[in-house]
Image: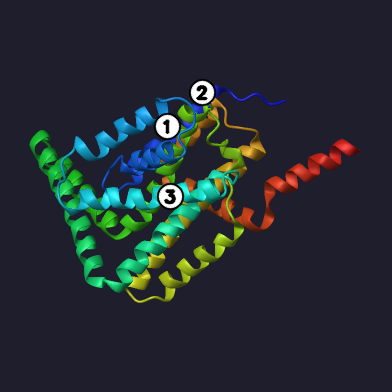
Amino acid sequence: MEFERPERRWLRAGLLLLVTFWASAVPTMALVTIPFVLLAVFLPGRGVLPLSLAAVALLTTFSLAPPEGAVWWLERGWGLLVGGWFLALSVRWPDSAFTTRALGALAGAGAVAGAFFARRPATFDAVDGAIVRELRTMSDQVVTLAQGSTADPELTTFIVNTVQAVTELQSRFYPGLLMIASVSGLGVAWWVYVRVARGSDRGLGPLRDFRFNDQLVWLAITSVILVLWGSAGVLNDVGANGLLFMSALYAVRGAAVVVFVTGGVSLTGGVLLTLGIALIPAYVVSVAMFIGLGDTWLDVRARALTALGRGSDT
C-alpha cells in the first residue's frame, strides 16, 4: 500500500493559491472566498467551523474592502457565478472528480456571461475598458515605484519596458488568465471546504492522477483554427485565450504523466525543474504541454497500468 506524506496535500492547495494570484490579471481572493462561502453555507458539513470561516470570508470579501470602481464588483460577480455553478454541480454529482466539476462550472459561468454580453455588446466594451484601465493603473504604480527607487537609468528603463510589455499581454489575455485563476481558485476553496467540513485533507488528488475529458481536445483545435484563420478581432482574441487556457491544462496533464512514469519528483529533480522553469519557461511548459496533448490519444498511464497487470500475471 502506498502511503502519501500529509504535507504534500497542503502543498497542493498552497501551489494552487499561488497560481490563483499569479494568473489573476487583477489579483483577488474572491475566486477562493466566494466559492468557499457557498459550499460552507449550502453544504455545511459537521460543526460550526465551516460557517464561522464562511462568515469571516464573507466579511473580508465584501465589507472590509470598500468598492473601488467596476472591477471590484466584476471580480466578486464572477466569483459568485463560478462558485454557484460549482456548488450546483457538486450537489448534483457529489462523487464526480473535482476537475470535472471545476471545468463544468467554468463552462457554465462562461456560457452565462457570453450570452449576457452577446445581448449587450456595449456592456462588454465597458467591462473590457474597465479591466484594461485597472491594469494600466497598476502598471503606472509599479513604474512610478521603480523610477523612485532605482538610481540606475538602464535598470529603470528595463523595468519600465518589462512592466509595460506584461501589461499589454495581460490586457489581451486576461480572459484566459481568469479561466486559469478560476479553476485554481476553486481548487483552493474545495480543499479548504473538505478540510474544515469533513475533516479530510484529501480534497485534491495527487498530481499524477490529474486528467480531464479527452473531448476537450476539440476546444484546443477550435482555438488554433480561430488564431490561424481568424481576423485580428474578437474571434482571434477568443481563440488566443482559449488556446492559452487549454495549453495550461495540457501542461499540467503532461507534468502528471511525467510524475506517474518516473514515480515522483525527488528533491534534486524538483530543484532542476524549478531552475528550468525560471530560466527557460517556454521550453519546459511546451514540452509538458505536448506530452499532455499526446496523452489524449496514447493514454500513457492506462497503458502502463495494463502492462504492469500483465506482468504480474506472468
Percent x, y of residue 11: 47, 29
Q: CA distance from mark 1 to mark 3?
A: 23 Å
Q: Position of residue 120 (x, y in %)?
A: 26, 71
Task: Name which residue lies at 48% across and 46% down.
Answer: 284
Image quadrant assignment for residue 20: top left
Q: Which comes before the other along the chain, label 3 or label 2?
A: 2
- Above or below residue 234? Residue 46 is above
**Can residue 251 be seen in the rendering of this structure?**
no
Which residue corresponds to mark 3?
Answer: 282
Q: Is residue 301 visible?
A: yes
Q: Which residue is mark 2?
A: 7
Residue at 57% from the left image edge and 47% from the top image edge: 254
Closest to the observer, 84 or 241: 84
Residue type (three-letter) at the residue carrying disc 3: Ala
Viewer-nearest residue: 278 or 250: 250
* Label 1 neighbour load within 10 Å: few <14, some 14-19, many 20+: few
Tag 1 residue: 14
Look at the numbered disc 2 and give the secondary structure of its residue: helix
Q: Could you say whether the residue bearing mark 1 is in a helix, strand or loop?
A: helix
Q: Quadrant of the C terminus?
A: top right
The amino acid type of the residue labelled 2 equals Glu
Tag 3: Cα neighbours inside 10 Å, few (<14), some, or many (≥20)?
few
| Disc on the earlier residue, 2 or 1 | 2
Q: CA distance from mark 2 to mark 1?
A: 11 Å
Given this view, does label 1 or label 3 mark the residue nearer the observer?
A: 1
Which image quarter is the N terminus in? top right
The residue drawn where x is 21% and y is 71% is: 122
Looking at the image, residue 36 sits to the left or right of residue 62; the answer is right
- The three-letter amino acid code for the residue at tag 1 is Gly
